[in-house]
Image: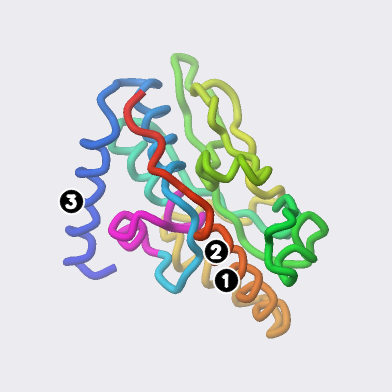
């Protein structure tokens, strides 16, 4: 991001925290996790966290950068972990999905790089996996949302895979990791995510996850 974008993101992050977090310690971490999780999913060309905060929708990359940076503002150690995975394998199939999405959901066939946050919370500074990919509205179609997470233990990840990197520059690292995909794999990934995003946007997704 440019210097101007960095400043704009810092301001947007401050506003996000002001709106959603009034607790300290683990309570604040739980509040910000659910606030980020409440952002509906959208996979698009703008993966930046600033874009996600401005639009109110984002995919795993932007939302976990927002979560990482928000947790750091609250005084926690937090990093984004980048995970090689078959993203479609973790998506539960649903009858209302477009055919091209439904045939891959649950069975797999979409090579991708997923993100989540690894943070240290609590008095014992224990490491926890925080995956804020799915908002509560998607529970109605079987998605593994993390509605009841209270700051103890790992959340349920949206995809299972192998951690490949824990970079500071998440956007650059994701580009590098995706660059190894074949043209066919890249096309399949793009088509699946576009179809999934379009379908999810048709679902009612209210802004859950205010202060708790």
Q: Which mark is residue 140?
A: none
Q: Is residue 58 magenta?
A: yes
In this rendering, is residue 71 above or below 62? above
Give the quadrant of the N terminus.
Answer: bottom left
In this rendering, is residue 122 above or below 17? above
Residue nearest the observer in this picture, 199 or 180: 199
- Answer yes or no: is residue 121 visible: yes
Q: Secondary structure at mark 3?
A: helix
Dominant secondary structure (helix, strand or loop) of the stretch shown in magenta: helix
Q: Which residue is mark 1?
A: 194
Q: Nearer the viewer, mark 3 or mark 1?
A: 1
Report the Cα–Cα distance between label 3 and label 1.
30 Å
Give the quadrant of the C terminus.
Answer: top left
Residue nearest the observer in this picture, 125 or 211: 211
The answer to whether 47 appears left or right of 200 in the picture is left
For the point 70% across and 53% down, the residue is 91
What residue span does the magenta drawing correspond to?
48-64
For the point 54% across and 31% down, the residue is 147
The answer to whether 35 appears left or right of 12 in the picture is right
User: Sequence order check: which comes first, mark 3 or mark 1?
Assistant: 3
Q: Secondary structure at mark 2?
A: helix
Q: Which residue is mark 2?
A: 197
Q: Position of residue 155 (x, y in %)?
A: 59, 33
Q: Position of residue 132 (x, y in %)?
A: 51, 42
For the point 61% across and 40% down, the residue is 139
Circle 2 residues within 10 Å: few <14, some 14–19, many ≥20: some
Circle 1 residues within 10 Å: few <14, some 14–19, many ≥20: some
Residue nearest the observer in this picture, 173 or 39: 39
For the point 75% across and 54% down, the residue is 93
Report the Cα–Cα distance between label 3 and label 2.
27 Å
């Amino acid at each position: 991001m440019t210097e101007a974008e960095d400043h704009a993101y810092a301001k947007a992050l401050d506003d996000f925290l002001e709106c959603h977090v009034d607790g300290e310690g683990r309570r604040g971490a739980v509040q910000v996790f659910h606030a980020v999780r409440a952002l509906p999913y959208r996979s698009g060309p703008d993966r930046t966290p600033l874009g996600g905060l401005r639009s109110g929708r984002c995919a795993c990359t932007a939302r976990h950068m927002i979560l990482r940076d928000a947790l750091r503002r609250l005084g926690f150690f937090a990093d984004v972990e980048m995970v090689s995975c078959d993203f479609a394998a973790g998506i539960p199939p649903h009858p209302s999905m477009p055919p091209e999405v439904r045939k891959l959901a649950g069975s797999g066939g979409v090579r991708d790089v997923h993100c989540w946050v690894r943070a240290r919370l609590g008095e014992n500074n224990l490491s926890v996996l925080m995956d804020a990919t799915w908002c509560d509205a998607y529970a109605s179609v079987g998605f593994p949302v993390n509605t009841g997470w209270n700051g103890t233990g790992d959340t349920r990840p949206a995809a299972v895979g192998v951690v490949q990197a824990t970079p500071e520059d998440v956007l650059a690292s994701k580009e590098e990791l995706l660059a190894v995909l074949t043209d066919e794999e890249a096309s399949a990934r793009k088509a699946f995510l576009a179809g999934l995003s379009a379908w999810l946007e048709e679902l009612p997704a209210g802004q859950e996850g205010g202060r708790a």
